[in-house]
Image (cartoon, rainbow, N blue to C red):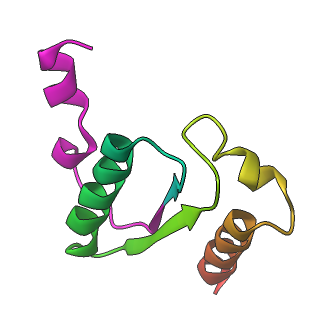
Amino acid sequence: MTDAEIVALSPLRLLHIEKPLVLAHGTAELPQLFENSRVFHAYRSALPGAGALIPVPRADHFTVLEHLRAKDGGLMRVVAGIAEGLRH
């Protein structure tokens, strides 16, 4: 990515939308990628619609989404809870 793309596409610079946003990061993640998640979560926590920051054991940015496939997995329970809350 170019410096201009980084500035233009950074989630910290995008318009805030008041919808629940849950961030998940793997515990086996590269330190800088974990830090990016932590900083973005701190930013979102100060705004309406903040959500949780969820550590996913032994996952990294290549494998974290695999945890959504497991119907009884922690990430799927979070997604189901958000969906349930939107129905009420």
Q: Residue at x 54, y 39 (%)?
A: 61
Q: Residue 35: percent from the left, percent from the top?
A: 29, 52
Closest to the observer, 50 or 29: 29
Q: Residue 10: percent from the left, percent from the top?
A: 23, 37
Is residue 86 located in the magenta-colored stretch of the structure?
Answer: no
When the figure is inspected, residue 49 is found, relative to residue 58, above or below; the finding is below
When the figure is inspected, residue 47 is found, relative to residue 28, above or below; the finding is below
Residue stretch in magenta: 1-23
Q: Residue 57: percent from the left, percent from the top?
A: 63, 61
Q: Residue 11: percent from the left, percent from the top?
A: 27, 44
Quarter of the N terminus within the rendering: top left
When the figure is inspected, residue 31 is found, relative to residue 55, above or below; the finding is above
Among the 4 quarters of the image, the one containing residue 66: top right
Closest to the observer, 74 or 16: 74
Residue extending farthest to the top is 2
Q: Report the side of 85 relative to 15 (left or right).
A: right
Quarter of the C terminus within the rendering: bottom right
